[in-house]
Image (tube, helix red, strand yellow):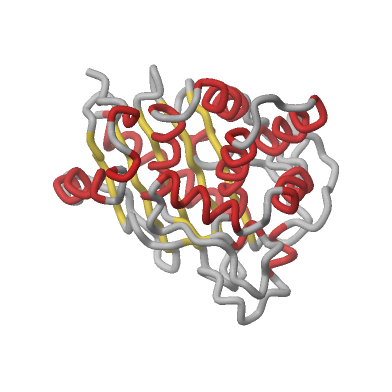
Amino acid sequence: MRIKPLAAVPLAAVTAATFAAPAAAHAGAQAAPPRVPAGTTAAWVVFDRQAGKIVATRNAHRKYRSASVVKILIAIDYLERRKSVPAADARLLRIMLRSSDDDAASTFWDRLGKGQIIVRQARRLGLSDTTPPPASKPGFWGYTSLSAYDIVRTYRYLLDRADARVRNTILTHLRHSTPCGTDGFDQTFGIPDALPRPWAVKQGWSGFGTTPPVRCGGGGGARAVGAPISWIAQRATGSGVPDYGRPVLHSTGLAGKGDRYVMAVLTAHPAGGTWSASVKRITTITRDLYRDVTR
């Protein structure tokens, strides 16, 4: 059974209340929820489109700094503001969404009004936990604050309300996420490593320095691009950004036949934590979460 498309609901009615009852009803539904290691903060929401309800949730409204997950909102904002896409911009969208390219994101961020992108999208999609970067750091798109709840709402908007051109452009790129980001980090943690295909993903990482511990060898390429958000984070003392001083890893997307499951798994790891240990944590959490909701 397919859920009633959000298109049938007036925009004014698409608020946090749309998910509130299912979230509450299923907050304790997991028989064996994933174990979160000490020192790690985790949040997740899983929405089952076939059942039409949230089937797993933890810290659903806790805010995290977005890292590269915000690139989905940047892409929606860009595509919905124009009827056609020049070839040069199409290339930027492709590398931004598939390989998490930071320069491409910064190009759109500056062109579209920086934090106003987030203001517009939060209002349009009904994202109650999503806010722009601090006023003192307007250029740092990775300092956008968001929640697992709002990320799931964003994917549901793409699936059920967005124009087909916008939906198909973004989800086609996310279905072809490359193993490597253009900054050389491996972006196969979480959903790609933990779940069987098919899936579509947008990953996020921040706070692990500018040089990956092991350079990723394929897919997205191995060139370093611009100033990674992890490097920017080291200079943002006192910014008020969620989990400043702690590395974050996020894995979000669609999973299962017919995009049955909409998933967002957000994590913040101990200060000074290693990339390999952090990747292992989020991948284990994601695998256990998926097993729990699909058994």
Q: Residue furthest left?
A: 25
Q: Would you place residue 15 above or below residue 177 in this image?
A: below
Q: Residue at x 27, y 44 (%)?
A: 13
Q: Position of residue 233 (x, y in %)?
A: 68, 68
Q: Would you place residue 17 above or below residue 192 in this image?
A: below
Number of marks in the image?
0
Q: Nearer the viewer, residue 159 or 213?
A: 159
Q: Residue at x 40, y 66 (%)?
A: 38
Say left or right for 253 vs 231. left
Q: Residue at x 44, y 45 (%)?
A: 124
Q: Position of residue 228 (x, y in %)?
A: 75, 56
Query: Quadrant where the C terminus lies?
Result: top left
Q: Nearer the viewer, residue 164 or 206?
A: 164
Q: Would you place residue 178 above or below residue 264 in this image?
A: above
Q: Residue furthest bottom?
A: 238
Task: Report whether residue 257 is seen.
Answer: yes
Q: Nearer the viewer, residue 78 or 73?
A: 78
Say left or right for 200 vs 107. left
Q: Position of residue 140 (x, y in %)?
A: 68, 62
Q: Position of residue 244 (x, y in %)?
A: 57, 72
Query: Quadrant where the N terminus lies?
Result: top left
Say left or right for 187 vs 23. right
Task: Report whether residue 278 is seen.
Answer: no
Q: Residue at x 67, y 70 (%)?
A: 137
